[in-house]
Image (spheres, helix red, strand yellow):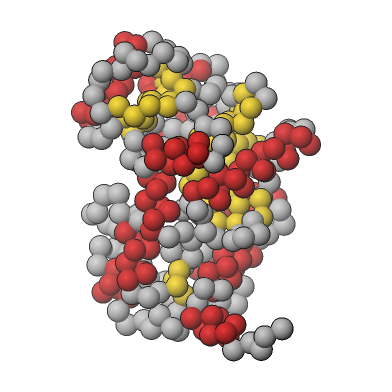
Amino acid sequence: MEAALRGQGHPVENLAVRDADLVRILKDYNPEEFLVFNWCEGLPGVPHSEALVPELLEGMNFTYTGSTAEVIELSWDKDRAKRVLSRRGILTPFWRRYESSDIDDWVDFPAIVKPAHEHCSFGVTPESVVTDHHELRGRVEHVLDVLGQPALVEQFIDGREFHVSLFGNGRVKVLPPAEMDFTAFEEMRDRLCTYDSKFTPGSRHYNGIQLRLPPMLTEDESRRLNRIATAAYSAIGCRDYGRVDVRLKDGLFYVLDVNPNPDISSDTSLVAAAEEAGYSYGEMLSRLVQLAAFRHPKALASLSNQPAA
């Protein structure tokens, strides 16, 4: 990332975050002279601290790339995020939140059980997909007892999955969707993006799920997918960039998740989508810097000094 940004003409100081004292790391930098490219998904030793990073940056008056603390915090609360989507009329799989293993009111199978307050598919494995009350109760108890948090139970949409990356504020650009191709797996429980599929090279899901870009979609499907992804991006409040995960079944698009701080490593679906749209890695990163730069005090001061039209 540093090399790519330098290649676009940006001066860069790389500050590795090796402990939780972000204030100390940034104390010698003047917020009026610097812009922070926030690539943190949390602070070392502080669980669930992704939203704490922008909160600290705002407290130090730094302009930074990406979404606000409030938006990132919302994305970690899957139940609340899905309620926001539903209120906006955006289709998302039917769900319930459980704080005990009393799940007799659930009737929709197959279902998938997720921890209610996690990120990056943490806690999601093939065993997360359940087909009856016995399996459901066991998986809910696993989330409650082992992961120590409420369980989110969702209708499992066994269909095609697309990751739609977007960037912009106001005028939002939708990048070409990337399809997660599950055709290597015959078993329904394997047709999902697990934690291993993202972070465990050599695992079955890491090797078996193929990225298809661009996917085979009709013009109508592409148009509807772009519209739904843009609506979800806006509903959650994403800023600068984000990724919306969507499944298609029986002609309907279901929003699974909205990630306002997706991984932007050079081998991710967002970067692949940007390249498909004609942006090099450096150009994409530079675009994110430019979006944040509009909020910088120097840019705002320049705008305020412009003569009225």
* Above or below: residue 10 compared with residue 180: below
Q: Residue at 47% of width from left, 22% of height from top?
A: 155
* Above or below: residue 191 compared with residue 53: above
Q: Residue at 34% of width from left, 11% of height from top?
A: 133
> Of 140 and 200, which appears nearest the observer?
140
Q: Residue at 43% of width from left, 20% of height from top?
A: 111
Q: Give residue 33's position: percent from left, percent from top.
A: 45, 84
* Above or below: residue 50 compared with residue 257: below
> Of 218 and 302, which appears nearest the observer?
302
* Above or below: residue 110 compared with residue 91: above
- Whether residue 281 appears in this view of the structure is no
In-image side of 223 versus 166 (left or right)? right
Numbered marks: total: 0
In-image side of 116 versus 261 (left or right)? left
Q: Residue at 70% of width from left, 50% of height from top?
A: 276
> Of 86 and 215, which appears nearest the observer?
86
Q: Quadrant of the C terminus?
A: bottom right
Q: Give residue 248's position: percent from left, percent from top.
A: 62, 28
Residue located farthest toward the right when viewing the structure as drawn: 219
In-image side of 281 versus 84 (left or right)? right
Q: Give residue 223's position: percent from left, percent from top.
A: 73, 40
Q: Give residue 275's position: percent from left, percent from top.
A: 67, 54
- Whether residue 62 appears in this view of the structure is yes
